[in-house]
Image (tube, grey):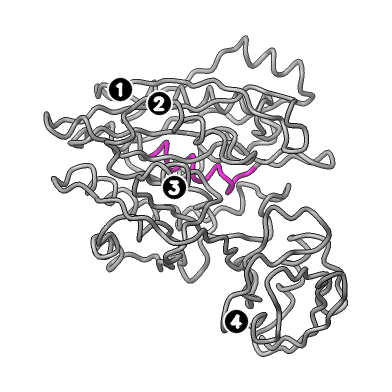
């Protein structure tokens, strides 16, 4: 089914007066079927230069919020729904915690159709904000996380059109994720539903850059009893190659706040790349065919756990996992879990993984990579750039800072 989306002319005019050369793409009609054109329409809009990024508290944040609200509200379907907006205040940056700005969670609820199960829930979520702009450049966040937001919007339209779900479906676009998962934290502390009755939370964060091998990372499979075996049938005939993140809970995305409430979670993610958190994360680099294949897996999983009589039983996972997977353009990996809280020069290893090049060369937890060959490593981006120049089989020198001393390691990739 089609829908028409209308934005407030007065609102856009007020934004235009504050943003020079303000232009945004035309809002396009979408279909109830999940299509490449629909994904492209959503991501092109949300990641256009006209929004000037979607950082919390910015005009782009508000425009994106209105776009999502209107989609949830105006999808052409007779299916009952409830659309709500949570407004809350967050610190504008982690460096200025007292400087507060307003952002949003946008929630669309499709009531279940079974008298017994309609009071239970499946949550499908994604953060819609992007990192703040820097150095006068716009961080459009096409993959991070226009891609996940687009999939949430398309899944909502699909389930609203068929309206066969027994449990109630709750679709949420979270703000404030880039500032520390603040939107999902606000939601679980101020829920619109009974969290004890949530069957599953599915989180879609950066699902737009599937590589040529079809690799898609999956987190959360150990968060319910026998969950992996229940999920296996959905992956057998899929074109995507599921890389299970294992028993460690990846804590850097919104599913983590639901997991902490003893809710089974799934996290779909196509991996870190060289455009991650930069001004080059743009729409033209999205793998739309890959997004279709991912949605062909996510949609039946949501349907299964929305309709099965069986209730998932939560299981606690092991210690937090912070692994950063290799960018698609990188052929090698050092095998470290970066310390994301570290803000000094270089890349600090929170954990060095056994039997990987870093560990084999003698690298230790806490080492800070400051040079790869002749390239100074000032941050994660230089780190990825350096590794992208290394081929499997190469032997290179890597300099680390350890206890304020420099140590040179011979690393065999």
Location of mark 1 (residue): 81
Residue ID at (87%, 74%): 405
Which of these two is toward me, 126 or 13?
A: 126
In the displayed structure image, the side of residue 372 where residue 177 appears, left or right: left
Residue ID at (78%, 53%): 343
Location of mark 4 (residue): 356
Indicate which disc residue 72 carries: 2
Is residue 153 rendered magenta in the image? yes
> Residue 49: where, in percent of width, then height?
69, 35
> Residue 175: where, in percent of width, then height?
56, 32
Residue ID at (52%, 58%): 320
Q: Which of the two marks, 4 or 2, is nearer to us in this view?
A: 4
Spatial separation of the CA atoms under disc 3 and disc 2: 19 Å
| Sequence order check, earlier mark of 1 and 4 | 1
Residue ID at (71%, 79%): 363
Indicate which disc residue 342 carries: none
Spatial separation of the CA atoms under disc 1 and disc 4: 50 Å
> What secondary structure is found at the residue carrying circle 1?
loop
The region drawn magenta spans 141-154
Q: Are marks 1 and 3 in contact (CB under 8 Å)?
A: no
Q: Is residue 95 above or below residue 291?
A: above
Q: Are marks 1 and 4 in contact (CB under 8 Å)?
A: no
Spatial separation of the CA atoms under disc 1 and disc 2: 8 Å
> Residue 228: where, in percent of width, then height?
29, 63
Outermost residue on the top side: it is: 10
Outermost residue on the front side: it is: 403
Q: Classify the position of the C terminus by image quarter.
A: bottom right
Q: Residues within 10 Å of mark 1 (few under 14, many from 20)?
A: some
């Amino acid at each position: 089914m089609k829908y028409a989306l209308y934005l407030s002319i007065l609102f856009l005019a007020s934004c235009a007066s504050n943003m020079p050369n303000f232009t945004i793409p035309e809002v396009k009609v979408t279909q109830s079927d999940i299509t490449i054109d629909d994904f492209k329409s959503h991501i092109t809009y949300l990641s256009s230069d006209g929004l000037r990024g979607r950082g919390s508290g910015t005009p782009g944040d508000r425009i994106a919020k209105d776009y999502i609200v209107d989609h949830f509200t105006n999808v052409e379907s007779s299916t009952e729904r409830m659309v709500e907006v949570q407004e809350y205040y967050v610190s504008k940056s982690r460096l200025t915690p007292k400087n507060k700005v307003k952002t949003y969670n946008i929630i669309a609820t499709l009531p279940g159709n079974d008298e017994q199960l309609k009071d239970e829930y499946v949550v499908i979520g994604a953060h819609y904000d992007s990192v703040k702009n820097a150095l006068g450049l716009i961080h459009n966040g096409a993959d991070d996380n226009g891609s996940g937001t687009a999939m949430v919007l398309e899944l909502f339209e699909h389930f609203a059109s068929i309206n066969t779900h027994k449990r109630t479906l709750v679709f949420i676009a979270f703000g404030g994720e880039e500032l520390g998962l603040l939107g999902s934290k606000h939601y679980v502390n101020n829920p619109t539903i009974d969290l004890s009755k949530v069957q599953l939370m599915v989180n879609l964060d950066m699902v737009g850059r599937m590589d040529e091998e079809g690799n898609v990372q999956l987190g959360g499979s150990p968060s319910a009893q026998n969950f992996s075996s229940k999920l296996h049938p959905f992956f057998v005939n899929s074109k995507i190659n599921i890389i299970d993140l294992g028993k460690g809970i990846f804590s850097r995305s919104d599913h983590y706040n639901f997991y902490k409430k003893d809710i089974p979670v799934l996290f779909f993610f196509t991996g870190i790349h060289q455009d991650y958190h930069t001004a080059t994360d743009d729409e033209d680099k999205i793998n739309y065919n890959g997004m279709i294949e991912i949605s062909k897996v996510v949609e039946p999983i949501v349907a299964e756990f929305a309709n099965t009589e069986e209730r998932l039983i939560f299981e606690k996972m092991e210690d937090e996992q912070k692994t950063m997977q290799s960018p698609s353009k990188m052929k090698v990996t050092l095998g470290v879990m970066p310390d994301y809280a570290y803000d000094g020069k270089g890349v600090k290893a929170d954990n060095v993984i056994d039997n990987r090049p870093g560990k084999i060369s003698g690298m230790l937890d806490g080492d800070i990579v400051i040079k790869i060959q002749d390239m100074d490593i000032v941050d994660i981006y230089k780190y990825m750039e350096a590794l992208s120049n290394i081929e499997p089989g190469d032997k290179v020198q890597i300099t680390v800072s350890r206890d304020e001393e420099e140590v040179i390691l011979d690393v065999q990739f």
